[in-house]
Amino acid sequence: DGLDAPKFIKQIADRKTGIGCDLVVITRDSDKEYCDIYAKFINSDGTTAEICGNALRCLGKELFKLKEKKQLVIETDKRLIDIEDYGNGNVCVDMGKPNYDCSSIPLSSEDNNNIIDFNLEYLKIGFALNIGNPHIVFFKKISDSDLTDIGPIIEHHKYFPDRINVTFADIQDKKNIKVNVWERGAGKTLACGTAACATAFVAAQTSKSENPVN
């Protein structure tokens, strides 16, 4: 009580004066008998995230040891998440079915049909979807410096009332995709689990890759 939670999270996340991280996970016992734990996700800028694929994998790996279990059910504000221990340090998270519904992403207008033409110089068509949190995927190679410039513009674009995670996907071949990600509330990150899932889904749906894809 009385804690300035966003300020506290930003202090923790700061890589110069704090521990340093992209996101903080806060857990407590779940009120649901069939759930192992409740988890809340806070971005490094102090804003709340609906879900985080990588954080769920990290949480699962620790809980497998703590609870001596191979399967877990995590309660989040978005939905229940199943996590499974695949052995050899591999953790599988069931991200559920992606949602193209405009109100679920959400988009400010339903006229775009999820395929959005930004027409921002070199940046054209993006595919918007929700995979527990909102994402837009562009099939285009981008440099880190360009990502730092364009990422915030797309994240805060008027099309996205709740902001959005931005992925630039470079198709290597039918089995491999390289991605560069600007995460909502965290900026450029080295990896994003939900972005990987969103990219793989859209690539398969548009026949840009095989399924599964690396």
Image (cartoon, rainbow, N blue to C red):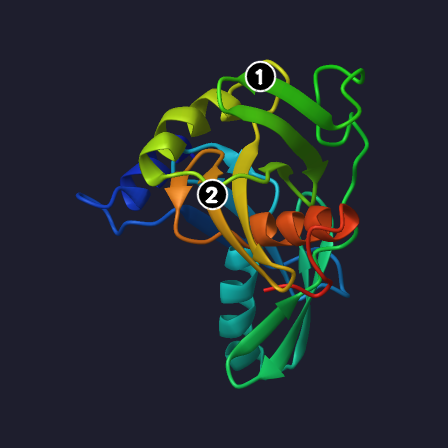
**Residue at point 49%, 72% (across, down):** 62
Left or right: where 71 falls relative to 10: right
Type of residue at label 2? Val
Disc 1 marks a residue whose amino acid type is Asn
Q: Is residue 38 above or below residue 148?
A: below
Specify the quadrant that holds the C terminus: bottom right
Q: Image quarter for residue 109?
A: top right
Residue sitting at x 30%, y 45%: 12
Q: Residues within 10 Å of mark 1 (few under 14, many from 20)?
A: few
Q: CA distance from mark 1 to mark 2?
A: 20 Å
Residue 101 position within the rendered picture, expressed as x and y whole percent measured from the top left: 81, 32
Q: Which of the marked residues, 1 or 2, is nearer the chain's N terminus?
A: 1
Question: Residue extending furthest front?
Answer: 173
Q: What residue sits right under mark 1 in the picture?
A: 119
Residue at the left extreme?
Answer: 16
In the rendered image, which residue does mark 2 sit on? 181
Q: Position of residue 46 (x, y in %)?
A: 42, 33
Position of the N terminus by quadrant: top left
Of residues 154 and 65, the one drawn nearer to the viewer in this rendering: 154
Quarter holding residue 108: top right
Whether tag 1 and tag 2 are in contact, CB under 8 A, the answer is: no
Q: Position of residue 58 (x, y in %)?
A: 49, 65
- Is residue 52 among what the camera can see? no
Residue sitting at 43 percent across and 26 percent down?
Answer: 150
Q: Nearer the viewer, residue 202 or 175?
A: 175
Of residues 212 and 47, the one nearer the viewer is 212
Relative vertical location of residue 211 with respect to residue 204 in this rendering, above or below: below
Of the two numbered discs 1 and 2 in the rendering, the one whose residue sits closer to the viewer = 1
Q: Which residue is drawn at the image coordinates 60% and 50% (left, top)?
A: 194
